[in-house]
Image: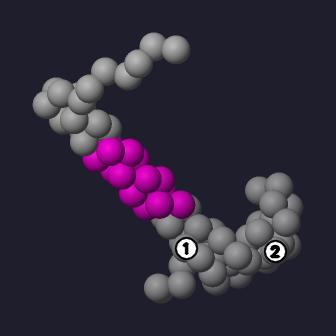
């Protein structure tokens, strides 16, 4: 087994940049999910679709739709 190389300033900085990129990616995913489920909730509140219709159209269970709405639109 090859021994690992000691960390240098460049590798430490690279790892820090990767960590920052991962955090930015995670935040972007969270924001996209929040936007998506808020749009779903808006359609349901406008009475354009029922929860069952949303679940059938998106191929999710009604329970999944309920949980996602609760998770991503709780602060509305």
Where is residue 59? Give x, y as percent.
83, 55
Check disc 1 and report its element: helix, strand or loop: helix
Image height of 31 relative to 11, above or below: below
Image height of 43 relative to 76, above or below: above
Q: Earlier in the sequence, mark 1 or mark 2?
A: 2
Q: Which mark is residue 63?
A: 2
Q: Which residues are magenta?
A: 19-33
- Residue 28 visible: no
Q: Is residue 10 left or right of residue 61?
A: left
Where is residue 60? Give x, y as percent.
81, 60
Name the residue beneath numbered marker 1.
Answer: 72
Where is residue 69? Give x, y as percent.
64, 76
Q: Which quadrant of the view contains residue 48?
A: bottom right
Q: Residues within 10 Å of mark 2 (few under 14, many from 20)?
A: few
Q: Foreground residue, 72 or 49?
A: 72
Q: Which mark is residue 26?
A: none
**Is 32 a magenta residue?**
yes
- Residue 1 visible: yes
Image height of 69 relative to 75, above or below: above
Q: Is residue 32 left or right of residue 4?
A: right
- At 39% across and 57% down in the image, what residue appears? 27
């Amino acid at each position: 087994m090859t021994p690992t190389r000691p960390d240098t300033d460049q590798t430490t900085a690279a790892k820090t940049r990767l960590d920052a990129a991962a955090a930015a990616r995670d935040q972007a995913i969270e924001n996209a999910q929040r936007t998506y489920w808020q749009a779903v909730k808006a359609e349901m509140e406008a009475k354009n679709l029922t929860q069952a219709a949303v679940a059938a159209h998106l191929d999710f269970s009604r329970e999944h739709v309920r949980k996602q709405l609760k998770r991503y639109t709780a602060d509305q």
